[in-house]
Image: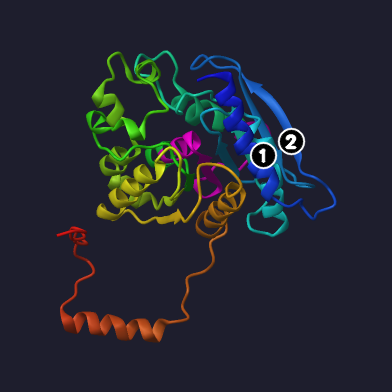
Amino acid sequence: MTATRRAAISAIALGGAALAAPACAAEEAARLETATLATALVPSPVKYSALIPAGAETAGLPLLLLLHGGDGDNGFLAGLRPTLEAAWAADEIPPLVAVTPDCDRSLYLDYFDGSQKWETFIVTELIPALRARYGLATNTARTVVSGISMGGLGALRLGLKHPDVFGGLASLEAGIEPALRFSDVKVRNAFQRGRPFLEERYGRPVDGAWWQANNPANIAIALRDAIVQAGLQIYLEVGDADMFHLDEGNEFMHRVLWDHAIAHEYRQVHGADHLGRTLPSRLRDGLRFLNAHVLRPPPPDTSYEVGKALVERLKRNAGVDDSAPRPLLPPTSL
């Protein structure tokens, strides 16, 4: 990855965020701070940024882990600060501590050779350290993860693998491929990641089993029952004009979740490219989902109980059994 390309993509991401997000209406600004955490699991120390809402005491607040993309770092949070402040001002999310760690281009992955263990670091060291530092809530209903591009991949992997830690995930334009085997990954879906890059993370040559064990679609299949039983709330979205063809991988991920009856919300944003000016509003959509389904869920909707009871009777009379496994959808072409 050249410095020029890295700077260009970072400018698109952060510039787009600043362009489209209005300033917070509150008189007092949120507090942004940066700290480091020493570790033996990854290159140390790890720098992270934390955004704390204006006037809020952090004790008991939820944690939003907001993961940066492939060419970002912890400074990504500063670029999205206006978006988060606008969400707070509109009461779209509760007061919480948003944290972005600098994870380089790790894919938020434990490397095959054990030289870097980013997933283990985040789950076993970073999150406990953040909870201790800020006095944050420790239950899953108050811990959520979101991310963009590589961060969307990280949000999927961390959330799906650890539903005992995260109550919900919001994955934006995740850097994933439409495949269940590494050998089936096409160049058009991974041209931004060269063979040396992948081999550093997945083994030389790439170990197919390790790739599968860390591929979100395979994780969803393997851990389906645990994900469903935990009630993990999943938000998945992508632009249909994604320059990296990530719409193909995310559509595939949606179909895997559908076929295995894993409840989720999926959006393909018409006309949206990768990053750019649509990103702030799309992030706020993801945050609203986490708010409504994890952080501040409303009481059950009972406004249509009479009509629903009628529909249930119609189902029984027609022999429709909703307790049976949902059938796969038929082919989309003849």
For the record, the magenta segment spans 130-156
**Place of residue 167 in the rendered image (x, y in percent of width and height, measured from the top left):** 47, 48
Viewer-closest of 192 and 307: 192
> Residue 290: x and y, percent?
53, 53
Question: Which of 327/11 is in front?
Answer: 11
For residue 185, above or below residue 315:
above
Residue at point 53%, 14% (across, down): 43
Query: In this rendering, would 327 be left or right of 169?
Result: left
**Mark 2 belongs to which amino acid?**
Leu
Q: Name the residue type under label 1.
A: Gly
Q: Earlier in the sequence, mark 1 or mark 2?
A: 1
Numbered label tally: 2
Left or right position of 156 against 297:
left
Q: Which residue has dot 1 on it?
A: 15
**Disc number at residue 159?**
none
The quadrant in which the C terminus is found is bottom left
Residue neighbourhood size for the residue with mark 1, other residues' Cα within 10 Å, grouped as few (<14), some (14–19), many (≥20): some
Callout 2 secondary element: strand
Front: mark 1 or 2: 1
Image vertical order of residue 124 relative to residue 239, above or below? above
Does residue 59 appear anywhere in the picture?
no
Residue 327 location, quadrant: bottom left
Whether residue 170 is visible, yes or no, is yes
Q: Is residue 144 magenta?
A: yes
Helix, strand or loop under label 1:
helix
Q: Residue at x 63, y 54 (%)?
A: 93
Can you identify the residue that label 2 sits on? 32
The local crowd at label 2, few if under 14, some if 14 to 19, many if 20 or more residues have their Cα within 10 Å, is some
**Residue at the image point whose x is 40% and y is 19% from the top:** 197
Residue 145 part of the magenta-drawn span: yes
Q: CA distance from mark 1 to mark 2?
A: 18 Å
Q: Position of residue 302 (x, y in %)?
A: 46, 78
